Image (tube, helix red, strand yellow):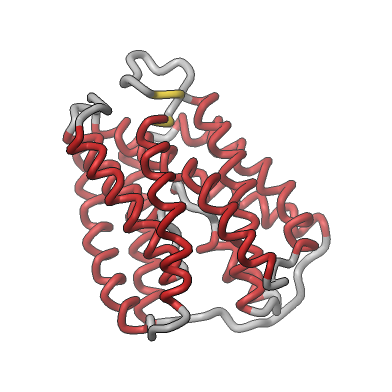
Amino acid sequence: MSFLDPRLVAELLLLGACTGFLAGLLGIGGGMLMVPFLTLIFSHRGIDAGLSVKMAIATSMATILFTSIASVRAHHQRGAVRWDLVRRLAPGIVVGGLASGAGVFAVLKGSTLALLFSLFIGFSATQMLLNRKPKPSRQVPGPLGAGAAGGVIGLVSGLLGAGGAFISVPFMTWCNVAMANAVATSAALGFPIALANTLGYVIAGRNLPSPPPGALGYLMLPVLAVIAAASVVTAPLGARVAHSVDTRHLKKVFATLLYGLAIYMVWQALAGH
C-alpha cells in the first residue's frame, strides 16, 4: 500500500473534504461516512478485511483530535459550551475510552465491530429520517452518575470510531440541557474521547504481527494526516452553509446513503469471518 500513489491521496482528500463538510452542515459525526469508505480503501489495497475495519475505526477516531478543536473554538466564542458538564463527564470518558481502545477493541473481531458499526449507522439514519429528539425529563446527575455516563460514552465511541455525539447529545437533552448547549458541549467532549481512544488503539495494536507501512498500532498515520488536513478546512464551510439552507431534506437524502453504508458494513462483517 503506497501512500505516494496520487490516486490514493486524491481519494483521501475527497473523503476528508466530504466528511468534514457534511459534519459541519448536518451536525453528524464524520465517522459514519469515514469508517465504511476507509474500510473499502484499505480492503482494496490488500489489507485483511478484519484488520481493515479496525484500522478504519481507529483512524477515523484520531481525526476528531483535529476537527474538534476548530469546532469547540467556534462554539466557545458563542458561549454555548457547558464547561461544567465537560468537567463532570470527561473523567469517565477518559477511563471508558482507554478501556475501549486498549482492551475491548483489540479483543473483538473486526467482523463483530463491523456489525456493531452497521447497527450504529442504521440507528442514526432512522433517527435522522424521523427527526426524533428525546424528551427532557430530568437533570444532569451528580459526579458519580456523570462519571458512569461518561464511561459509557467513551467506551461505545471507541468501539465505533465516533465522537460520541450520538450518545452525549441525547443524554444531555434528556437531562434538560438546551439543544444548542448539548451540541456545543458534545463537540468539546470529542477531544478527550478521541485522545483516550487513540492512545488505546496505539497500545492495543503495538504488537500487530505484520502491520502495513505507515501504521502506528491500529492507526494509519499517512491516511490520518491527509484526511485531517482536508476535513479541518471544509468543516467550518459546512457549518456556515447550514445557517443559510434548510437541512431537513438533505438529512433525508443522507439517511438513505447511511442505510446503504450499513448494508456494506454487514457485507464486510461477513467477509471478515
Up/down of 255 relative to 10, above or below: below
- Tell me if I can see residue 255 in this picture: yes
**Residue 193 rendering spot, x and y as whole percentages:** 60, 47
- Tell me if I can see residue 269 in this picture: no
**Residue 55 rendering spot, x and y as whole percentages:** 37, 34
Up/down of 9 relative to 254, above or below: above
**Residue 213 rendering spot, x and y as whole percentages:** 32, 20
Q: Residue at x 22, y 57 (%)?
A: 263
Q: Residue at x 67, y 57 (%)?
A: 149
26 vs 73, left or right, is left
Question: Is 248 in front, or is 97?
Answer: 248
Q: Residue at x 37, y 23 (%)?
A: 214
52 vs 128, left or right, is left
185 vs 53, left or right, is right
Up/down of 272 relative to 263, above or below: above
Up/down of 132 relative to 111, above or below: below
101 vs 238, left or right, is right
Quarter of the image for the C terminus: give it. top left
Q: Residue at x 30, y 46 (%)?
A: 13
Quadrant of residue 189 within the rendered picture:
bottom right
- Number of on-image labels: 0
Quarter of the image for the N terminus: give it. top left
Question: Is 206 in front, or is 151?
Answer: 206
